[in-house]
Image (spheres, grey):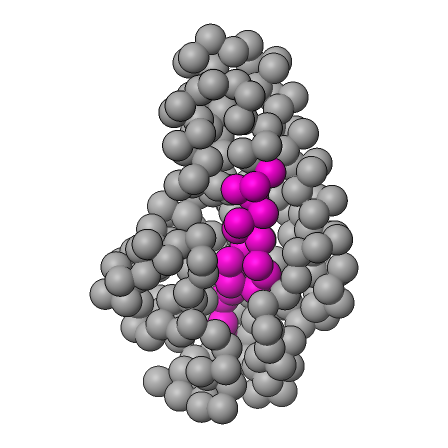
Amino acid sequence: MIKTVIFDMDGVLIDSMNVWLEEGYKLLKDLSNINALESVHKDVPIRARTIINDLIEAGYSEEFCYNLHQTWRKNMKQRYLTDIKLKPRVIELLKLLKDKKINIALASATKKELINAVIKHHGIEKYFDYVISVGEVGKDKFHPDIYLSCASYFNTKPEECLVFEDAYHALMTVKKANFKTIGVYDEHSKSLFDKIKEVADYTIHSYDEILDNLFFIEY
């Protein structure tokens, strides 16, 4: 029986991953750094630090790279609050879970100030009982700590928690830690969706697939 549901944010609740790519490419396209441009197509936003490190290794100053990173995040905050939308039927799903008295957590690689701004902007902050970022935990989603923090907060076991994620590496992490999983399709990670199908307990292309069938709460 599922007692706690844990959501990622980017690519799961909101359609933001391609915007991270777009904003990153705008900043990097004039730098003529192939490694950084390749990275922006693979890793944004989870490994943004890797992209900055590529630039430092290519000879750009740490001050320049820091300022670029800050500009990237500032631009993204503006986009979060203007043209980035919730995925269809997200609010219906959150309401359903709340009505079922299921704990709801948000665990994201995005900075906490941006998480708070996004959920407030969309009017969904009231649905989350616990919100945490990898920055607060001190480890990224290649480690289970952020998910274990959610389980611990609600005094639930990993096997009593269901995690919604769109990232292959994050799904690998939670499966190894005995969480139940739903892999969410996102355009950004579509090239890995076959691998996601292999590791996730269930996969969905949209929330239509589960809102009319509450199997995921019972299993």
Q: How many numbered marks have been drawn onto this rendered protein structure?
A: 0
Please give left or right for residue 20 compared with residue 35 in the image.
right
Can you say whether 195 is above or below 5 in the image?
above
Reply above or below: 35 against 151: above
Residue depicted at x 53% and y 26%: 29
Q: Locate residue 68, reporting x and y percent.
A: 62, 24
Residue 99 image offset from top left, x and y in percent: 62, 87
Look at the image and tell me in which quarter the N terminus lies: bottom left
Q: Is residue 51 left or right of residue 101?
A: left
Image x and y of residue 94, in percent: 61, 77
Q: Residue at coordinates 40% horizontally, 23% vertically from top-left?
A: 34
Say if residue 158 shows up in the picture: no
Q: Is residue 15 magenta?
A: yes
Locate residue 113: give its quadrant: top right
Can residue 86 be seen? yes
Residue at image x 52%, y 51%? 17
Q: Is residue 103 left or right of residue 117?
A: left
**Percent coordinates x, y for residue 122 in the rendering:** 73, 64
Instruction: Indicate yes or no whether the magenta region holds residue 204.
Output: no
Q: Which residues are magenta?
A: 4-23
Up the image or down, 25 lies above or below 180; here it is above
Please identify the quadrant where the C terminus is shown. bottom left
In this rendered view, identify the residue nearer to me: 101 or 96: 96
Q: Residue furthest left?
A: 198
Q: At 45% across and 58% down in the image, what residue appears? A: 187
